[in-house]
Amino acid sequence: MTRLDDTHKRASIGARRNPQSEQAILDAAEALLREAGLAGFSIEAVARRARAGKPTIYRWWPTKTRLLLDVYQRLKTSLPSTDTGAIQSDCVAFLEGLFAHWSGGSGAIFRSIVAEAQSDEAAAAALRAYSGERRQQTAGIFARAQARGELAPEADPLLAAELIAAFAWQRLLTGRLEISRDELDRTVRQMLTGVLRRPASPGSGSSPAEG
Amino acid sequence: MTRLDDTHKRASIGARRNPQSEQAILDAAEALLREAGLAGFSIEAVARRARAGKPTIYRWWPTKTRLLLDVYQRLKTSLPSTDTGAIQSDCVAFLEGLFAHWSGGSGAIFRSIVAEAQSDEAAAAALRAYSGERRQQTAGIFARAQARGELAPEADPLLAAELIAAFAWQRLLTGRLEISRDELDRTVRQMLTGVLRRPASPGSGSSPAEG
Amino acid sequence: MTRLDDTHKRASIGARRNPQSEQAILDAAEALLREAGLAGFSIEAVARRARAGKPTIYRWWPTKTRLLLDVYQRLKTSLPSTDTGAIQSDCVAFLEGLFAHWSGGSGAIFRSIVAEAQSDEAAAAALRAYSGERRQQTAGIFARAQARGELAPEADPLLAAELIAAFAWQRLLTGRLEISRDELDRTVRQMLTGVLRRPASPGSGSSPAEG
Amino acid sequence: MTRLDDTHKRASIGARRNPQSEQAILDAAEALLREAGLAGFSIEAVARRARAGKPTIYRWWPTKTRLLLDVYQRLKTSLPSTDTGAIQSDCVAFLEGLFAHWSGGSGAIFRSIVAEAQSDEAAAAALRAYSGERRQQTAGIFARAQARGELAPEADPLLAAELIAAFAWQRLLTGRLEISRDELDRTVRQMLTGVLRRPASPGSGSSPAEG
DNA sequence: AACTAACCGAGACGGTACGTCTCGTCTTATG
DNA sequence: CATAAGACGAGACGTACCGTCTCGGTTAGTT
């Protein structure tokens, strides 16, 4: 990428990790995942593409899964939980942002991680830790709404975060990320309001009656 | 398993498929998946265990995925959607049944299929079809409740089914199927009632009665 | 060949060998040997080409070797040992005829038999029998010359036959059948006269003339 | 064989060929050929016996034939052409030595090479080269005799070598290596003297003077 | 005329070997 | 002492043949 010497002699830089190699390996891994998915992702292939020795990879990433996770970590960047001041639009923005992020190529990588986690306990643990952390983060959206008085006091923000994430996951894993703005709205609304019939309270309605 | 004649001479029965071999292969595949998951599942291993020749497997299941799907198909059986007359307990029963089913070994197989679907389009399509069909089925629970007047008229049963299934999937895929009855209750309740604050109907109040 | 109905339905003709099938199988085997040598010669391939069932082949030719031998037998035809009245030209004619015969395609088949005989005892026995018989036949050339007084009385016709055949075999097996008439002449001459120095006819003697 | 550490941990020794593995593979190949001939000789079997990975074999010996040739090369050692001072005994010694060499197990290997050469052009070329070289070597026996004046000046040593080798080959390939000393003597004598009747030169005679 | 017996093509069966691929470990030579 | 390189043992991949088996159908002799 940033290198000028394309004769690519990238030898040791002494008794410490060579960041150029690290970059080259992560770049290669990411590219392979984007191009061919988990199927084309092998340590052998990464080493070939990165012009790195296999032991160099194994030295820093003891398992394929760890490399996978590092690749995903790198592009997790921000996804800043937008705060529009209204929970409905916050949730829609959250899902829209996530789906856009995933559609941009990183979805393939995350799918790979989930797949890997189904047969590799290390990946499973990492995925569990990662998704727990993300859940906490997402729960923040609901906690803020609760603080604003938008949510019922007894609502569990963490559980709400789990449910919305679960929806997103299933869409990703079954390749159904294409979803219209309108459908997204309706989905979020039903998640927020639930499905139960409201007790016909006199002079009220499902949404905020008036002021 | 059910065989008694473990002298296993299971030769050809003429120019057509031998159902004994088919059974033995599916049995072996299922056992391997249950025992070691997708990692231990190889055509080679299945052939060894089933005492079958590899070409016999390849003859009938052109890809590993097809065999995987056939294995799952076999044990899809019923999971009869219980009808307790109340949506809350219906949903709890649904999740309890599903989690029990998955915990009983078939979860490992379903996880394998989901994993496979992340890199194999055939598996993905099959999974999509299967989960769509199941969603329809699950939506029935909500449609019946709606007919009873338990649910709001504008509630979307199919969407509700998607949300509850998504929750279950994520729990399975992250290895978090152990869940107490109480937690299940709370989860279902929040799914059904939503999280929004109630419009403070006069003389009522879901929880914060007073203080 | 002679059939007109190329829909080639060649069913059983009752409880006995169907000569059409036998022909088709031998034809196919011979063709395969000529085209691709021993490497392309498999029961499977013969069956495919002959549109015959494998058991039909195994019924009549218990081993690949037997089929091989039958194919060779079929085209052994004659090779009539020419009798020109002079041993030198008889031998040259013998070798020329043999080399021409082998060059015409049957050489590939005979090479296959020799190869087969190196790892299959049945083929080895058959080859031994066959070559012994041929040796007897070839010895006739020398016996006739001996009767004519052309050969020394103590010469062994059978041994002479063995030597000339051995020469031919080695040429075949190392792919050196192309040989000029002149070289053939010289070869035969040296075989017949030997290599020892002549006793310088009258009044001399290389070896022990007398005492 | 000569190893003491049969715990056989024989890993890589860096980015170059491991001579231990090479030895083990050649040993295994030779043993298999001696024990079961070409039929029992498969890359799979060699790998198993040598405790080597198949790719290790394929890396260094692209074809089965190459491995075969290397095995034979290894035991070609010497066969020093004895020089007794008399062509008759030289030839007998040559054949006796060769037959003994072949009977000692290497015959099976050479037969395999000849067989292989009948369907593999690479093997054929190698065999041609090898036998040409040996022929040159053997011709030395006759050339020396010619220099001594034992042979006729017009005799062709190379052709003589070809004829004696051909005799040996045919005996090997038809499994007729058992031959008495006496028969060997007679055979060599007829090769050397030829079969033609000597011109009845006065006062001489090849053997029976006259009556 | 029905029955039996052996043939026929077809093709599935359990196996073995093929040659290629990737795995994760190892040891070198280079810097 | 980290690096690129690449050999190593192991074993799965998907394919080709092996030799055996059973099938459904055909035809000829025997009852």
Image (cartoon, coloured by chain):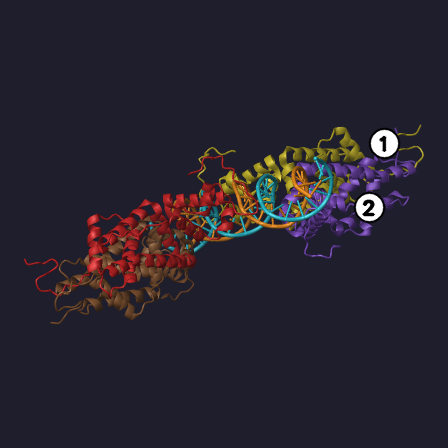
Chain colours: A brown, B red, C purple, D yellow, E orange, F cyan
Tell me residue B192's x, y (percent).
21, 59
Residue A82 located left or right of residue D86 = left
Looking at the image, is B37 positioned above or below residue B118? above
- Tell which subunit mark 1 falls on: C
| Quarter that holds the N terminus of chain A | bottom left
Q: Whole-Å distance between the Cαs marked 2 and 1?
A: 43 Å
Residue C79's disc number: 2
Residues D178 and A33: in front is A33
Q: What kind of element bears circle 2?
A: loop
- Tell which subunit mark 2 falls on: C
Extreme left residue here?
Answer: B211
Amino acid on which the number 2 mark rests in the picture: Leu
Residue at the spot 41% in from the left edge and 60% down from the top edge: A36
| Quarter that holds the C terminus of chain A | bottom left
Residues D145 and A174: in front is A174
Residue D25's disc number: none
* Label 1: how many Cα within 10 Å (few below 14, some 14–19, many 20+): few
> What is the quadrant of residue B85 in the picture?
bottom left
Q: Which residue is mark 1?
A: C208
Q: What kind of element bears circle 1?
A: loop
Residues D63 and E10: in front is E10
